[in-house]
Image (cartoon, rainbow, N blue to C red):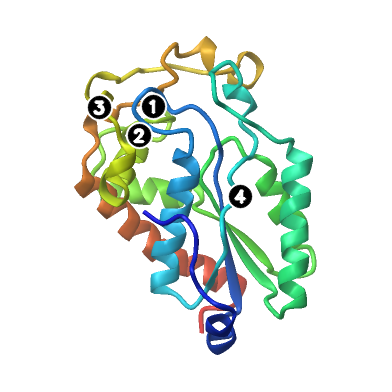
Amino acid sequence: MNLLPTATSTDVEDRQPRVAVLPVGSFEQHGRYLPLITDTAIACIIGQEVADAYPVHLLPPITMSCSHEHAAFPGTVSISAKTLFAVIDDIRASLARSGISKLVIINGHGGNYVLSNIVQEANVDGPAVSLFPLSADWDRARDNASLDSDRHADMHAGEIETSILLHAAPELVRDGNANADHDGGPRPFLLVQGMRAYTTSGVIGFPSFATAGKGKAVLASLTGSFADHLEALGTND
């Protein structure tokens, strides 16, 4: 699996895309069977699927973000919300100078709450930035792929993430997902107490349900849902 786009400057000039797509991942624990780059890999996989289906400019990923709730697990690295905001703001400004005024942020990590604020502020003067996938996009994908778990129970390193990687990057999935299921229950103080308060393994979800077929169906659903975001930005013609 190649996480980086390989387009040349000439490719972009010829295509003249109106929308850029920016994958945002994380570098955080995902149990013993998925790598620290899981969220980045998934954001890039979704980005590539979207770029294959729509005339967008796929950017390389932001690989570290706001994973502070995972800090108790070895290997996790975070940056501050203000840093993530500033980096994306700079990227937007650079894109605008090159003639691309619309951006879709593909978020692979649920803890990147600041991305919603970026979208909120960017669109004051009209649609310019969208955040994808939204909760509704994920829920539709779960339904379309006939996943056994729901979004709350399958929060982290579970059925949906493992399925996507089994389909698109099986080399990243190590042995162990078949017996790693963990129900974290209600998690009202996750951001106060961190993931360790709800899981010792780092897993909250049901990776034993994962299959490559489900991952393929999830990605197909998300690719279809992306059209709604282009329409919202006014660039679906």
Q: Residue at x 61, y 21 (%)?
A: 71
Determine which residue is flagged by label 2.
150
Label 3, secondary structure: give it: loop
Label 4, secondary structure: give it: loop
The percent coordinates of residue 195 (x first, y second) are 53, 18
Q: Residues within 10 Å of mark 1 (few under 14, many from 20)?
A: some
The percent coordinates of residue 91 (x first, y second) are 72, 61
> Most extreme residue toward the bottom, as rendered?
14
**Quadrant assignment, res 174:** top left
Q: Earlier in the sequence, mark 4 or mark 2?
A: 4
Q: Are marks 4 and 1 in contact (CB under 8 Å)?
A: no
Q: Nearer the viewer, residue 150 or 9?
A: 9
**172 versus 101 height, above or below:** above
Marks 4 and 1 sit apart, C-alpha to C-alpha, by 27 Å
Q: Earlier in the sequence, mark 4 or mark 3?
A: 4
Marks 4 and 3 sit apart, C-alpha to C-alpha, by 27 Å
Q: Residues within 10 Å of mark 3 (few under 14, many from 20)?
A: few
**123 versus 166 height, above or below:** below
Marks 3 and 1 sit apart, C-alpha to C-alpha, by 22 Å
Q: Residue at x 59, y 69 (%)?
A: 20
Q: Residue at x 20, y 49 (%)?
A: 213
Determine which residue is flagged by label 3.
175
Q: Residues within 10 Å of mark 4 (few under 14, many from 20)?
A: some
Indicate which disc residue 153 carries. Answer: 1
Q: Indicate the amino acid at tag 3.
A: Asp
Q: Earlier in the sequence, mark 3 or mark 2?
A: 2
The percent coordinates of residue 26 (x first, y second) are 56, 39
Q: Are marks 3 and 2 in contact (CB under 8 Å)?
A: no
Indicate which disc residue 62 carries. Answer: 4
Q: Earlier in the sequence, mark 4 or mark 1?
A: 4
Q: Are marks 4 and 2 in contact (CB under 8 Å)?
A: no
